[in-house]
Amino acid sequence: METEAQPVGRGTRNAVVVAIMLGMLLAALDQTIVATALPTIVSDLGGANHLSWVVTSYLLAETIMTALIGKFGDLYGRKRMFLLSVVLFLAGSALCGMADSMLWLVGSRAIQGLGAGGLMVTAMAVIADVVPLSERGKYQGVMGSVFGVSTVAGPLLGGLFVDHLSWRWAFYVNIPLGIVVLIVASLTLPSVKAPTSPKIDYLGILFIGAAATGLTLVTTWGGNEYAWGSVVIISMIIGSLLALGLFVVAEHRAAEPLLPLRLFRSGVFTVCSIMSFIIGFAMLGGVTYLPTYLQFVHGASATESGLQMLPLVGGLLVASVLVGQVISKTGRYRIFPIIGTVLIGVGLFLLSLLSNSTPYVETAAFMVVLGTGIGLCMPVPTVVVQSTVDYSDLGVATSGVSFLRTMGSSFGVAVFGSIYAHQLPEKLAPAVQSAQIDPRLATTVSGVRDLPATARSFITAAYADSLHVVFLWAVPVAALGFLTALMLKQVPLRDTARMSARDVGENFAAPSSFDSEHELAKLAALVVQHHKRNPAPEVLAESGLPLTAAQAWLIMRVYRGGRDTGSATLAAITADLKMPPGVVEPLATQLVAAGYLSETLGNYRFTPAGLEMFQRFVGAFRTWMLTRLADWDPENTEAFSAAIDRIATQMIDQGQSLTTGKHAAALTPA
């Protein structure tokens, strides 16, 4: 359930927002920052067969934590959970930097992933604790953009650390920044708990975590560590499927299920879930293994490989922005995932054609195709789901789609890694023999780069051939995505879903909340932001109240300032706006003359007529909000109407729903 923002000064609020954004950036960066560092990490620690788990362990832990931490925050307080998440992230980062084996690094990445999942989810909840709902729309966009920035910056930063410091600094850099976040958050965050205690689906989370981990291990170990027909692999397959079955049983019985199975009765939700899984599969799989090709085959440095990845992420971001704008303006979306999945398939196939003699310009063109395909698909699942589910399922459906995208990412990296780990030894052994070199030189980036040209061509061909198989095997996944996209129906989009389509960052973000009212509050903030945080003229025009926007603003400020004492001075009313009290004195005089306020020794209080006018305005604002969100629940069910009442009341109570002090000053007569 949405809670009210706590009263904090603007300076404190800005400090909190900066700290929260920094924490989110660190967590989001570490999804991709290791991509360009992985070849060097493998060169240093060995264990190329565990390469994919450096990414997968992080993603799995992050995914599981996102399902838990929000409700833990409601139970024990979001400040406490946010600080715990920062500590976990810092501990994981320190352990990653100290790792002296690949298994140590994989385990440390899991700890780091737990902290990252907590940071991502609690960050938006903490923002809700300090930022008034009417101002939250602009913060949502900025917070979401962090994920888009991290997709671009992660590989590049990872390369810079490897080339100029050490791969260990890709993790150590989190520590000083994380300590700043910890200090600022501990000093400034308010302690807030939800007014009701949520029910946590422990069994559902346990079983889906076990199934995901087991199936990921099967795809990683099968044919590499163990034969596909071995007792270990067969047992893990049976155990994973059993865990999946138990998850289904648990979801049927849970009071508040992690992923209600009734959602899959909707063909639209099922199609969007599969698409979201495939998008994650293709994106992280490509981002993780392309730097290996660029460094081992093209001889690029880690920094250069990060820069050379920009065509992929650039195509992804540009396509996402354009699709979001088109959906927002037209409401049409079905064609984009159809074209997008075709481009993903074509892009993966083209990448499978890369050899040790393919020029970079050609490689970049192939990356643009893949990135554009992913970008065309990415905004669609969330927007469509938000337009088709009932209000009661808004939270779990929206977060469920993001949850499945993250799961797809972990499976994509694992499957790509399994194929790579199986192919590389087979291709590398004869290449080493033909090149007549020490086998150890063929396993490090620097070793391959320093080989004589003739010997190097044998080794780079082996790496290119291995990655050829990796990308080729991913093409059928894109084909499945295409068939799935063909089944996606065109449905009318809700106005709020069309607004949210422009928020590209939301397409990259981790699941933020499984609570419907929290998600509805985010959409309400978008509605207010769409009106430049000044819906008052429309509210007053539609209600017929005899007030100007500036007068309505002052009535709200008097109510807010006089809640405890019954009256408020102009200085108290304008204190947090940093404006002279005299600026609004003419407005107060107007309201006194109209009989809505009385004034005694500089203290203003409501008259009976003023109190009635205040109540009428509150009702008008609720009606205005309900009208703008009517396509969510045309019948205005009790739960939806109650949620709208609480959200509207928050905006009124925070005194920010009408206009800012600057606008009020502009409206005030001289």
Image: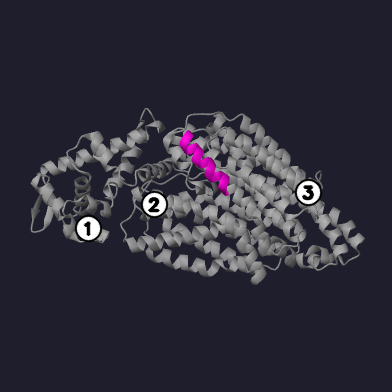
- Answer whether labels 2 and 1 touch (C-beta < 8 Å): no
Which residue type does callout 3 highlight? His
Q: Is residue 103 magenta?
A: no
The span shown in magenta is: 317-330
Q: Nearer the viewer, mark 3 or mark 2?
A: 3
Q: Position of residue 259 (x, y in %)?
A: 54, 39
Q: Earlier in the sequence, mark 3 or mark 1?
A: 3
Q: Is residue 619 visible?
A: no
| Residue at 52% across, 32% down | 332
Q: Nearer the viewer, residue 50 or 140?
A: 140
Quadrant in which the N terminus appears: top left
CA distance for labels 3 and 2:
47 Å
The furthest residue to the bottom:
165
First-in-chain label (2 vs 1): 2
At a point 73% along the width and 66% down the height, the residue shown is 45
Q: Position of residue 591 (x, y in %)?
A: 13, 47
Give the Cα separation between the discs numbered 3 and 1. Answer: 65 Å
Spot occupied by residue 265 in the image (x, y as percentages of width and height): 55, 29
Check disc 2 and report the residue beneath it.
Answer: 128
> Does dot 1 land on a helix, a strand or a loop?
helix
Mark 3 / mark 2, whichever is N-terminal: 2
Residue type at tag 2: Ala
Q: Main SS of the magenta segment? A: helix
Whether residue 326 appears in magenta in the rendering, the answer is yes
Kind of element beneath mark 2: helix
Q: CA distance from mark 2 to mark 1?
A: 23 Å
Q: Left or right: 498 with respect to 443?
A: left
**Residue 232 position in % (x across, y down):** 77, 48
Q: Residue at x 72, y 38 (%)?
A: 476
- The residue that disc 3 covers is 468
Looking at the image, residue 517 sits to the left or right of residue 94; the answer is: left
Residue named by callout 1: 574
